[in-house]
Amino acid sequence: MTASISGTARVAGVAGSPIAHSLSPMIHNAWLNAAGLDGAYVPFAPSPAGFEAFIQGLRGGVITGLNITLPFKEAALALADAPTPAAQAAGAANLLLFAQDGTIIADNTDGIGLLAAFGEQAPGFDPTTAPVVILGAGGAARGAAAAFLAAGAPQVRVLNRTLARAESLAEALGSRVSPLPLSDAARALDGAGAVINATSAGLSDTGGFEVPLEATGADCVVMDMVYKPLVTPFLATAQALDRRTVDGLAMLIGQARPAFAAFFGQPPPAGVDVRALALKSLGQNERT
Ligand code: NDP
């Protein structure tokens, strides 16, 4: 069934540059269609120089809201009038809502998506029992660190190529965050409950940097935010070591659920296998 789009349709979308690769239109429109809602979700690719004018022009509720992706997440937060605590803690917005009175609300649902992905693919994982290791110190890493701190992680070890960036992340998020250089990975992984790749680099045998996953304990859960390919070399190494793994596609779908509810006023309908649709669109099979 295809959703009708009338003159009173609710419109939302995603803004990024580039945007053509985004799976978000496919995910949200599949939910809209299944729910039979009068609405649409469309991609926008404003130029980096034109991003601010693009967002200011949407004040007043021309569209209900936007997901925000690279490279605009920090700029989106800076343009908003009313950031949620999650957006402030992450230092970035992946969601803007345009209120009728002209106010722009900034939120961040990446942390919800990350924890939902762990809940789905590593059932029983308890973030409160052991330190969490995050590789990277960019926007995604900061959001992940904030989410795990909010979930009660006793310590978050942030390892980054540029140590100064990990140090400023720790300064922003407080004393439970320990900044470390990548060269300390083996020490940092010792005793960790989870390790998350939040860098944009390939890891392990693709020419990216090496992470000694053998230093993790048998119960450590390994997650990669990258989902192309679904089983990254990082996750493949973890699976070869018999570690439980969580993939970036589960996070992407997990962050989309609360965004859909914010845009269209109701949660996504049950019974739509958006993961299967996303995998088909990526030309990937379920990990077997
Ligand atoms: P940023 O550009 O803000 O940060 C990139 C990070 O990767 C930095 O820490 C950078 O280190 C590190 N890095 C890049 N190249 C290398 C390298 N060759 N060796 C070591 N470290 C490297 O990106 P984001 O934080 O926004 O995103 C990170 C990744 O997470 C992206 O791949 C993004 O697609 C993914 N992501 C996935 C989501 C999902 O739903 N699955 C949601 C959000 C993000 P340095 O500081 O030294 O430059």
Image: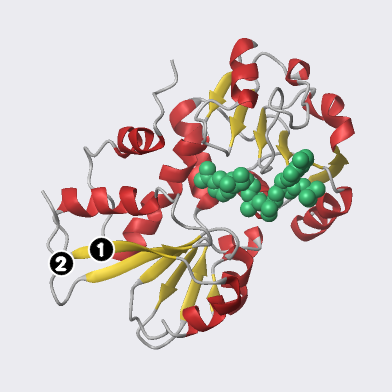
Question: Looking at the image, which residue sits at the far bottom?
Answer: 101
Q: Residue 141: x percent and y percent?
A: 68, 48
Number of dots carrying numbers: 2
Looking at this view, is 115 or 39 the one in front?
39
Asked whether 118 or 15 is in front, the reply is 15
Question: Which circle's residue, 2 or 1, is located before the other in the chain?
Answer: 2
- Residue 163 left/right relative to 252: right
Q: Residue at x 14, y 77 (%)?
A: 7
Residue 128 versus residue 68: which sits nearer the camera? 68
| Quadrant holding the C terminus | top left
Q: Residue visible at 54% across and 72% down?
A: 47
Relative image position of residue 66 (x, y in whole percent): 42, 67
Specify the quadrant of the image occupied by residue 273. top left
Q: For the residue labelled by badge 1, is the local secondary structure a helix, a strand or a loop?
A: strand
Q: Residues within 10 Å of mark 1 (few under 14, many from 20)?
A: some
Identify the residue under disc 2.
Answer: 5
| Disc 1: which residue | 40
Which amino acid type is shown beneath numbered disc 2? Ile
x 33%, y 65%: residue: 263
Q: Name the kind of residue labelled 1 in the image.
A: Ala
Residue 271 drawn at (x, y percent): 21, 37
Mark 1 CB within 8 Å of ligand 1? no
- 143 in relation to 53, above or below: above
> Are there few (<14), some (14-19), or many (20+) residues within 10 Å of tag 2?
some
Circles 2, 1 touching at the beta carbon (< 8 Å): yes
